[in-house]
Amino acid sequence: MRTEKDFLGEVKIPEDKLYGVHSVRAQSNFPLKTPFPIEWYSAIGLVKKACYRTYRNFRNTAIEKQLNGPKGHQWMTDELIGSLEAAADELGAGNFFEHFIVPGIQGGAGTSINMNINEIIANIALKKMGRKAGDYQSIDPLDHANIFQSTNDVVPTALHLALMQLSHKLEIAINKLRSSMEELETTYRNQLRQGYTQMQKAVPSSYGHLFSSYSDALSRDWWRVSRIRERLKEVNIGGGAAGTGMGIPRFFILNVIAELRNLTNLPLAHSENLTDATMNQDSLVEVHAILKAHAVNLEKIANDLRLLGSDISRHQTVKLPQKQMGSSIMPGKVNPVIAEYAVSISHKVYANDQLISSLAAQGCLDLNAYLPSIGVALTESFNLLESACSSLQNNMLTGLIVEAGKEETELYQSASVTTALVPYIGHNMAEKLALRMKSTGKTIFEVNEDLKILSTEDLREILKPSSLVSKGFSLNDLPENKK
């Protein structure tokens, strides 16, 4: 065991651990084991690396110009800077995550996150230089690992970076799902289906229309998610504790963003108002609203297909792939678990949206103390939605079959089909046909034969599948204009 201390006292740390006294205190204060997102952890490593590179350039520029550093600060050696940069590289790759012991839900606006990271980086760097963990006289978590940084600019900047990377993954997942939906649209383009409004039979439609509607909704989702980077590209790195840059060299403030851009290949930019970017989190609320809209569409799609493929559905025209046993007691039962998975995820995203909105509003004066909880909820929603898209595509749309033969036959027994006749015979005569169909259970062709409202030839022409799913009618389609 090694002993570490702060102004509150001493703490014993196992020799093989890379965290330190500040991390242990936070772990004790926040005992709930809420996982911290590894994507955010890795992004902090990249931000730290950019800071160390900027520090090196600042030092070199000052030395070339024969300028002294800040009073009380001795320039770090190339070896020390290199060790810090190599340590930050390790975090950027997701290594040593087991030494990050601070939970995702915490108090303190992320100070515990930054300190746990600083301690890991300092101790990795010490080991790379052949020294023992905890030798903070050589490399200090604050004076060295945290040089010219603040929790309040490093942690939110890293969150924006992590979310930009996650948004790209979600874009890909949505696009794959949309592509699968387009394939279903093409396959069943002219397959008639009974339309429903308010759970009652409505005008005829087609499975092509159904799947194309889902495809277009997903296209909108993809477009909105693709714009997320624009919402997140402005960051506050270099702003310090409150966005004023106090205690940070102007050279560092102006140049650190370029280093971060080079490291990430992302279109990052300084916010024009660093204090605004530090205190206000409405951009994160906007980003999650985009995720919520996508969750709404996923739930609608999943619920619709679950209903159409259910035993309640009269013809069970939509055949969902059977993926796993559905009951521990009922033999042969299979449940729509993929659709249920997507619905469950959607509702978790809705809950996260409420959390993010309310905590963003809780920001007080110059800082939002609840950024850790906001960030955890955001990263969770990105990962949940990517998972939902992937499962819907691979486990439900792939293998989904439409068997609409019987449904198409019985469509002509549905009184709603008389809607197609309104332009040709008027509402009152169409209603007469509909009421007779309901009372007798006969098809529209049989009832028309009884009532002699239209010729059989004209009726079949009007009601052929291509006519029913075409967009509207032309005056040239009317019998009187064909003669």
Image (cartoon, helix red, strand yellow):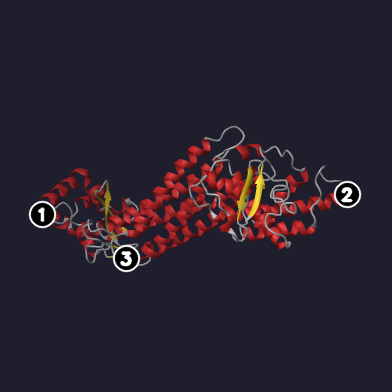
Q: Quadrant of the C terminus?
A: bottom left
Q: List the residue tagged with mark 3.
A: 324
The disc, 1 or 2, on the residue closer to the chain's N-terminal end is 2
The span from disc 1 to disc 2 (Cα, nearest Å) is 102 Å
Residue pictured at 20% horizontal, 61% vertical: 409
Residue 208 is at least partly visible in this image: no
Q: Which residue is mark 2?
A: 65
Q: Which residue is mark 1?
A: 450
Residue 165: image location, x then y, percent? 57, 55
| Mark 3 neighbour density, 10 Å: few (under 14) some (14–19) many (20 or more) | few
Q: Are marks 1 and 3 in contact (CB under 8 Å)?
A: no
Q: Camera-side residue: 353 or 224?
A: 353
> Is disc 3 placed on a helix, strand or loop?
loop
Q: Secondary structure at mark 1?
A: helix
Q: Earlier in the sequence, mark 2 or mark 3?
A: 2
- Up the image or down, 360 lies above or below 169; here it is above
Residue at image position (39%, 48%) is: 347
**Residue contact between numbered discs 1 and 2, judged by CB atoms under 8 Å:** no
The disc labelled 2 sits on which kind of residue? Lys
